[in-house]
């Protein structure tokens, strides 16, 4: 496990401090890049921080460690959040975050396995990362290895047919070593998910596909997220999905719950306002 | 007399022109899987409800825990294979070529090739010799759409023996690889002793007037064409280009220099496949007059494999015709 001590009075305060730093990283990175996806990066910060700073077994100093749990960012456009989490876990220097989306950078617009340590799969084409995670879990389980596989999906992403092919496969093969998390922020580029292409009822659909469903009403609350992960880890005989209700653009007032911030970077001025808000958070 | 023109180093079957054995190349894949299963416990196979059709059923009987049935969901199957590779497996994705390269093209591109995962695609039922199932199941664009993807190797075994060798090699070499296999019985023209090296074209018949570069079943058609043309005093070199990517540039340039004109022959659209790959090499290195034998930008239809080859003009006769046409250009230049 990887812990970074941030001086707070308990672990959750530490996690909150890390999350706040990562939000600032996301704003700085996308502003510097002049493009990227801040909205869906900000909505999944607590999920990623929970995984990398508490839930998962991993060794940043040895990214290929056999015993590591795997994480796949199936919603690959949240790359800024993942990069910030990886850098703050110690996979690569923090300064490198400023190279996001620039020529010759290891920080591609969407994660690329071959360019950056800590990336388990190149993703960005929605739905594919989920299937890759299912393949990892299938391989690990067939060898009776203890490693868990975590995969983060977007709620717009589950409109992809491939997601349901993979959901079928995971329950068919009883992949109880697979834990999916749905970043349920309710928005996609074109607007509200329910208006663009309705995905509801989500819980019933996943249950019908043979999954155990855990709903976290506030996907920004570490206590609730960590409890959900703890429960998911105990699962036997079927995969688990944690549906985390989140806020797109969380933490920046003018980005919150606005679809337009899905794939648009803040200007320098907007970034300054956002960073001031996060400073006083 | 004809056999004197065959390259002895290729150790071809004795009965090449005398009722050669007829076996689908998918069978060679199936046989190789059984050996690989023994050799390497990390070899696993994924099938999309066509387990026996793609000849993976015996592997499944022998190694039930290493055959993953993925149902009728090829896109997921391709990406799951990528994930299996990520945890150390050597997955073979076995389904019809049209689904492997078409339906799951982007998964092949992004999940497999962009990641450079160690996934092997057994693309069975390639070409138009799929036959009676009709155009929906023919794969006549598969080579074109697969070879444009970076990091992948694309191989079209000439017969079941070469298919077996290619499958075994595939498991030993790291990286994405596609093997295009046949449903229909193809003449067995090679032997266990015939050399096979990925990326190295085999000159199987010597000739100085014109070179025919061919792949798959069209290699045999080219040999038949060469035999016919010999009676008319035309000396045809035949090259088995089993690896379309990476293509053997040196062999292509050498043959073009030595014979002056070339023909390509493939069971594929004349756009995008072997003909295009050869043309790309020649146009940048040593342009010579060229003709491509392939399906002429149309969909196939139901029919017996041989009937389809005739109707869509990819038989030895069509190769012979192309050879004569290209030779006219040779003499025009001279």
Image (cartoon, coloured by chain):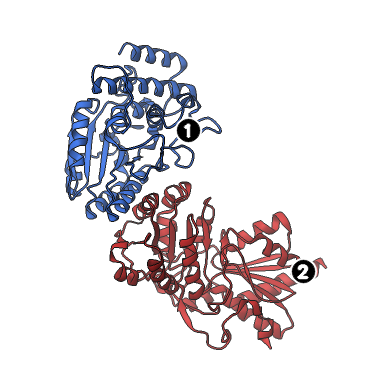
- In the picture, the disc for residue B330 is 2
- In the picture, the disc for residue B101 is none
- Farthest residue, direction right: B334
Front position in the image: B173 or A110:
B173
Task: Please identify the quarter of the rendering in which residue A37 is found.
Answer: top left
Question: Which quarter of the rendered picture does the C terminus of chain B lie within?
Answer: bottom right
Front position in the image: B148 or B78:
B78
Which x, y percent locates residue A52? 32, 32
Specify few, some or many for label 1: CA neighbours under 10 Å numbering under 14, 14-19, or 20 or more. many
B54 above or below A32? Answer: below
Chain to which mark 2 belongs: B
Q: Please state if B176 lies on the left or on the right of B248 as rendered.
A: left
Q: Please state if B141 lies on the left or on the right of A261 as rendered.
A: right
Distance from disc 1 to disc 2, alpha carbons, whole Å, reads: 53 Å
User: Is residue A140 shown to the viewer in this render?
Assistant: yes
Task: Please identify the quarter of the rendering in which residue B318 is found.
Answer: bottom right
Q: Please state if B328 lies on the left or on the right of B14 as rendered.
A: right
Question: Which quarter of the rendered picture does the N terminus of chain B lie within?
Answer: bottom right
B133 above or below A241? Answer: below
Chain to which mark 1 belongs: A
Q: Residue at x 72, y 65 (%)?
A: B254
In the figure, the red chain has which letter?
A: B
- Would you name the residue on which mark 1 appears? A107
Does dot 1 land on a helix, a strand or a loop?
A: loop
């Amino acid at each position: 496990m990887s812990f970074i001590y941030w001086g707070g009075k308990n672990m959750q305060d530490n996690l909150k401090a890390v999350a706040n730093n990562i939000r600032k990283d996301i704003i700085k990175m996308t502003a510097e890049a002049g493009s990227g996806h801040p909205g869906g990066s900000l909505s999944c910060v607590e999920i990623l921080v929970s995984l990398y700073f508490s839930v998962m077994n991993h060794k940043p100093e040895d990214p290929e460690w056999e015993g590591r749990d795997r994480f796949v960012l199936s919603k690959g456009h949240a790359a800024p959040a993942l990069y910030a989490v990886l850098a703050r876990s110690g996979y690569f220097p923090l300064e490198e975050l400023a190279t996001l989306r620039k020529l010759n950078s290891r920080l591609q617009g969407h994660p690329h396995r071959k360019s950056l340590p800590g990336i388990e799969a190149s993703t960005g084409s929605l739905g594919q990362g989920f299937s890759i995670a299912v393949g990892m879990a299938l391989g690990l389980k067939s060898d009776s290895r203890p490693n868990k596989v975590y995969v983060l999906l977007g709620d717009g992403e589950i409109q992809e047919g491939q997601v349901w092919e993979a959901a079928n496969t995971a329950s068919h093969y009883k992949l109880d070593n697979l834990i999916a998390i749905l970043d349920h922020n309710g928005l996609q580029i074109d607007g509200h998910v329910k208006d663009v292409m309705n995905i509801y009822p989500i819980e019933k659909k996943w249950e019908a596909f043979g999954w155990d469903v855990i709903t976290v009403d506030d996907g920004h609350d570490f206590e609730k997220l960590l409890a959900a992960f703890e429960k998911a880890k105990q699962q036997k005989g079927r995969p688990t999905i944690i549906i985390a209700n989140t806020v797109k653009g969380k933490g920046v007032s003018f980005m919150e719950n606005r679809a337009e911030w899905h794939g648009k970077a803040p200007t320098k001025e907007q970034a300054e306002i956002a960073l001031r808000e996060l400073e006083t958070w | 007399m004809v056999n004197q023109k065959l390259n002895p180093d290729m150790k071809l079957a004795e009965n090449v022109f005398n009722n050669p054995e007829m076996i689908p190349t998918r069978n060679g894949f199936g046989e190789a899987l059984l050996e690989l299963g023994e050799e390497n416990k990390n070899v696993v196979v994924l099938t999309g409800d066509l387990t026996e059709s793609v000849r993976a059923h015996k592997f499944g009987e022998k190694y039930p825990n290493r055959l993953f049935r993925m149902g009728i969901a090829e896109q997921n199957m391709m990406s799951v294979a990528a994930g299996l590779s990520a945890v150390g497996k050597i997955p073979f994705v076995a389904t019809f070529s049209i689904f492997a390269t078409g339906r799951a093209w982007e998964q092949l591109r992004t999940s497999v090739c962009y990641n450079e995962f160690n996934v092997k695609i057994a693309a069975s039922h390639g070409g138009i010799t799929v036959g009676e199932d009709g155009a929906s199941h023919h794969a006549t664009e598969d080579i074109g759409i697969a070879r444009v993807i970076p990091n992948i190797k694309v191989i079209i075994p000439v017969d079941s023996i070469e298919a077996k060798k290619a499958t075994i090699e595939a498991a030993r070499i790291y990286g994405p690889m596609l093997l295009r296999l046949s449903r229909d019985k193809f003449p067995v023209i090679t032997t266990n002793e015939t050399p096979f090296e990925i990326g190295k074209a085999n000159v199987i018949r010597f000739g100085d007037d014109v070179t025919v570069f061919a792949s798959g079943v069209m290699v045999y058609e080219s040999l038949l064409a060469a035999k016919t043309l010999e009676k008319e005093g035309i000396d045809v070199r035949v090259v088995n280009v089993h690896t379309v990517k990476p293509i053997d540039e040196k062999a292509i340039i050498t043959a073009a220099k030595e014979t002056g004109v070339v023909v390509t022959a493939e069971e594929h659209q004349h756009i995008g496949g072997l003909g295009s790959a050869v043309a790309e090499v020649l146009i940048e290195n040593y342009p010579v007059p060229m003709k491509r034998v392939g399906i002429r930008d149309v969909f196939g239809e139901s029919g017996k494999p041989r009937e389809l080859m005739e109707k869509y003009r990819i038989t030895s006769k069509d190769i012979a015709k192309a050879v004569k046409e290209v030779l006219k250009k040779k003499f025009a230049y001279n």
